[in-house]
Image: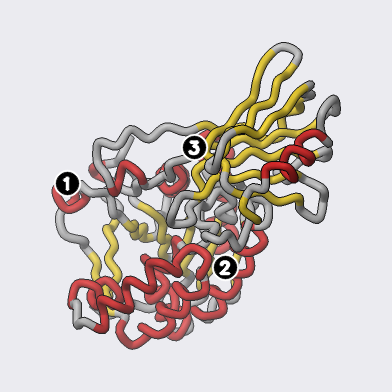
Amino acid sequence: MTIPKERHVLVIFPHPDDEAFGVSGTITTHIQQGTPVTYACLTLGEMGRNLGNPPFATRESLPAIRKKELLASAEAMGLTDLRMMGLRDKTLEFEDDEKMVRMMEELIEETNPSLIITFYPDFAVHPDHEATARAVVRAVRRMEDRPKLHCVAFANNTLGVLGEPDIVYDIKPVREHKMNSMKAHISQTAWMLEEMEHKLQNGDTETENWLTLERFYAYRWDQDFE
Amino acid sequence: MELVEVNQLQAAIDSFVGKDVYLHLETTNGSYASHFNEGFFNAGAFIRNVVINFELGKVVGDSPHRVGLKLPHGWVYAQGITHFEIDEEGRLLLAGHDGSGKLAVALQLSKTPFSY
């Protein structure tokens, strides 16, 4: 599938590095096609567990490190409109639900996107992913003229319940940008990248596919999550 | 952070005795624990910027250590502490990292509030 030109793409995820794994190739492609992209990252991943052994960071120094990594990832993708929304990692589901919806509404009103990318509610595994997905879906549901809503789903039951992804983009042409986006988040990805390089060297096609195909589900309004 | 040196850590804990101090206490298995291991019972707790005033604090055992604080009307303790640091703001940061470097527990004391 080729990636169509959009008026504006709004990407909303809770953690620095969420964009890297799932959608950095798609973001890069949109930017290279001249589509403006806004990435709203709701937290700085303050509660990340990867602090190294021996440790390279503390609970208190981690946010500044991850902020730098997020900026580096944006640079790797060519992204210039990065919003850091100032919420705290692992607390999103406990925020006032309406406040979360309003935050999404304000981002949508300002950027007027033709496409929004976030997680798929109930298939997003991490409580922050789920809270983000719920807030985005609620905000879009209330709109008269809804933009396209493409969702990332990776819960273990995704394939069984949602089936194959509706949208699969081959992002091989920007593979290096995706690698660089993942490498930018080195405090969180070092171990994984090492393992991945090893698999790629051994010609593991599953890993290569994981790296070059990005998968989305168009949100199913006829099977709304609530 | 450095591996816990018991005498140094004990002295650091002692320096907070009898003062109003801000507490950060956290235990975690990570939010993906039951994703990678279905059926895993994921439990943890988190408290940040609650003021306590303790009268006795002790670090006990070989690494991973236990650290307990006795309050006039209660207790705070953490187990699994492996590393410690007094940061540039004079805050006492204790952490327990598992074999792969992942944080499993944190106990932190500060005379000023931690960030948000």
Q: Amino acid at mark 2?
A: Leu
Q: Is residue A73 above or below residue A159?
A: below
Q: Position of residue A28 (x, y in %)?
A: 44, 79
Q: Residue furthest top?
A: B73
Q: Amino acid at mark 3?
A: Glu
What's the mark number on residue A93?
Answer: 3
What's the mark number on residue A79?
Answer: none
* Sequence-first tag of 3 and 2: 2
Left or right of B59, for residue B15: right
Identify the image quadrant of residue B42. top left
Tell me the chain of label 3.
A
Q: Position of residue A205 (x, y in %)?
A: 18, 77
Q: Residue at x 35, y 44 (%)?
A: B33
Left or right of A67, for residue A35: left
Determine whether the residue tagged by mark 1 lies in a helix, strand or loop: helix
Q: Residue at x 38, y 72 (%)?
A: A193
Identify the image quadrant of residue A189. bottom left
Q: Residue at x 48, y 40 (%)?
A: B28
Determine whether the residue tagged by mark 2 lies in a helix, strand or loop: helix
Q: Quadrant of the N terminus of chain A?
A: bottom left
Q: Residues within 10 Å of mark 2 (few under 14, many from 20)?
A: many
Left or right of A211, for residue A91: right
Count of numbered marks: 3
Q: Position of residue B93 (x, y in %)?
A: 69, 45
Label 2 sits on residue: A70
Q: Amino acid at mark 1?
A: Val
Label 1 sits on residue: A161
Labels 3 and 2 positioned on one and the same chain: yes
Q: Label 2, label 1: how many angstroms apart (C-alpha)?
A: 33 Å
